[in-house]
Image (tube, rainbow, N blue to C red):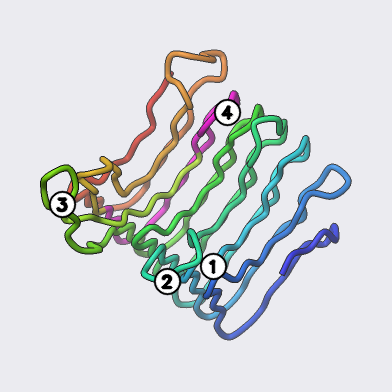
Amino acid sequence: ISGTSADGIHVAADSFTLDDGARLGTQAVAGNTPPVTIGAGTVIVRGGGQIHADTDSAADAGDVTIDAVDSILVRGREAGDHGESGVYATTTAPSAGGRGGRILLRAPEIAVERRGIVTARTRGSGDAGEVSIEARTLRVEGASRGLEFLDGEYYDRFDVPRIEASARGAASGGPGRIDVVASERVMLSGWDRWDEERAGLYVMPRDRNADAERGSGILRVETPLLEVRDRATLNAMSQ
């Protein structure tokens, strides 16, 4: 489902699941990317499902707000998936001048698993956006996908999730901001030894030695218990 109305897309349901490669999102129109809002008891994004309010133009990306009474689950790639599963408010093209949007996830239990992604990154000249999370517990956790024989050695390959507001690819824009407030716990876990990919929270510039005038991003985590396991990371590399 894709919309260009200035009012955006608004969903209210007892439960909401996006699966099997389905996409729900908005496109930039008249200098604006309309918002996406979802309110439900539980929200599940998996199987290549994607919620997005992206931009590839001078318009800023839109806002994505997900409110759940019970839980939000973003579960990434598994066997048979149709690409990444995730929530996006991003600048998608190097020529795009728009900034990343704002993602707000709010629920008692929030989990991002396997190769799930929540991102307000930029690939253009506009800065990355913001990701805000309000929860009782936040879990960002990778999972094994089994042994693979690579370069003469067996590796236990891991799918690792990430939450990010970074500058990626050919971006000349700067990083954005992540704010996490969890009243009980934040847990990050997972590392793929072959790709050196780590589960975690990322607010990073494309190149810490370039475009210093863009400044650094902000990563704020407020919780009584922070657990970082199995080489997961909180990465707010400055320039």
Q: Eyeballing the image, is 144 above or below 197?
A: below
Q: Earlier in the sequence, mark 4 or mark 3?
A: 3
Location of residue 230 in the rendering, given as x and y in whole percent from the top left corner: 17, 50
1 vs 3, front mark? 3
Location of residue 32 in the rendering, given as x and y in whole percent from the top left corner: 81, 46
Mark number displayed over residue 80: 2
Residue type at the position of mark 4: Ala
Q: Which type of secondary structure does the marked residue at label 2 adopt? A: loop
Q: CA distance from mark 4 to mark 3?
A: 32 Å
- Left or right? Give the position of 96 relative to 229: right
Verify CB contact (< 8 Å) between mark 1 and mark 2.
no
Q: Eyeballing the image, is 172 above or below 146?
A: above
Q: Which residue is mark 1?
A: 49
Residue drawn at 44 percent across, 36 percent down: 203
Residue type at the position of mark 2: Gly
Q: Earlier in the sequence, mark 1 or mark 4?
A: 1
- Left or right? Give the position of 186 relative to 216: left
Q: Which residue is mark 4?
A: 171
Res 116 → quadrant: bottom left
Q: Earlier in the sequence, mark 2 or mark 3?
A: 2
Q: Which type of secondary structure does the marked residue at label 1 adopt? A: loop
Q: Which residue is mark 3?
A: 155
Residue drawn at 43 percent across, 49 percent down: 163
Most extreme residue toward the bottom is 14
Q: Earlier in the sequence, mark 1 or mark 2?
A: 1
Segment tinted magenta in the rendering: 166-188
4 vs 2, front mark? 2
Q: Is residue 173 magenta?
A: yes
Location of residue 141 in the rendering, given as x and y in whole percent from the top left corner: 29, 59
Residue type at the position of mark 3: Tyr
Local packing at callout 1 (Cα closer than 10 Å; few below 14, some 14-19, many 20+) is many
Location of residue 14 in the rendering, given as x and y in whole percent from the top left corner: 58, 86
